[in-house]
Image (tube, grey):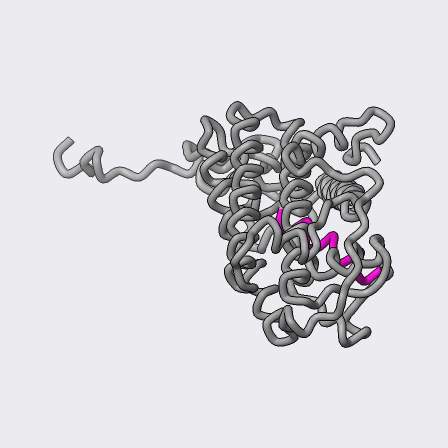
Amino acid sequence: MTGSTPPRKRRFSLWRADKGPQDGPQHGARDDERGATGTGAASLEPAAGRGDLPASVEVTAPAARGRAAVFRQKARHNARRGGARMKAGLGYLADRIIELAPRVPVRDLATLRRQFPGLGPEELADKLVAGAVRATAAVGAGVGAAAALPVPPAMPAELAAEVTGVAAVELKLIAELHEVYGVRPPGTLRQRSTAYLNAWTEERGIDATKPSTVSAALNSRMKRELRQRIMKRMVRNLPNLMPFLVGAAVGAAMNRRDTRKLAARVRDDLRTMQVPWDALPELPALERPADPLDMDAVTEDAIKEFERPERGDPRER
């Protein structure tokens, strides 16, 4: 009709508009942009202060804290158990060295001068050091060769055998150096062996003119220091267990170096208190041990000593 309103500009009448559900607003209905609401209208309040939302779940549950506490307790228990076994093993090895010390055969000055005629004190001491260096290098090479194909359960026994063999050779060297420099400590065979063992532990010479420096009895302090010396020596000897005969070369080189270093320290101390041979009083011959240690097979003896069934495994104590 001419003059009527175009259809695009007509307004819908109110009775045709969507008035929503007949039963009123639907609470809990989902809004595409704001989600579901409980009142029919989206709320802008923070979720923490609203009571119409479910409570949040705690991330750190008590069960997780309990498992962490159990793991810590097991770690502490294993550390204490390992420390107790290591202490027992070191104590066992220290006792074996203490037992072997009186069995080490020592040559007195008269015997040494007969075996090496025409040598003075320093030349004779050089000969003794060279022989001890060769012996400890042979011990290291022998243990390294035995560990060419390493077996983990046998490693502690191999390290113990090496430390015991090297200790026997170096104890013999220390005792004979005291004879060469004319400062034999007083006392019986066992008392002198204890004094030499103390000198080996502290890497120093013994001043026989000062009784305070001569420890003839094994007290708790000496045993503690002996265990510490053994532990340091075993840690340094760990590379000797490398496979494919590499450990043999490493063990020989390390033992050679350590023995030379020990001999140099002991000789420096003994030179300060040296007594010339022509001023030495007539000394009695050294008594022989009742069961002398075979120095040529000291490594095999140490391994057999560790594998004696009546002794048991020190790691199981």
Q: Is residue 268 above or below residue 133?
A: below
Residue 142 placed where, x, y %? 55, 32
The extreme left residue here reads 2
Asked if residue 23 lies in the magenta stretch, the reply is no
Question: Can the viewer see residue 95?
Answer: no
> Which residue is found at the position 74% from the left and 52% from the top?
227
Extent of the magenta region: 219-233
Viewer-nearest residue: 51 or 18: 51
Tell me which secondary structure the magenta stretch mostly adopts. Answer: helix
Residue 214 placed where, x, y %? 79, 68
Quadrant of the image occupied by residue 278: bottom right
Quadrant of the image occupied by residue 88: top right
Q: Is residue 117 above or below residue 122?
A: above
> Which residue is found at the position 70% from the left and 35% from the top?
294
> Which residue is found at the position 80% from the left and 56% from the top?
194
Residue 72 placed where, x, y %? 73, 45
Picture quarter with the C terminus: top right
> Which residue is found at the position 21% from the left and 33% from the top?
7
Viewer-nearest residue: 214 or 152: 214
Question: Can the viewer see residue 268?
Answer: yes
Relative placement, left or right, of 187 versus 269 is: right
Viewer-nearest residue: 3 or 239: 239
Asked if residue 220 lies in the magenta stretch, the reply is yes
Picture quarter with the N terminus: top left
Residue 229 placed where, x, y %? 68, 54
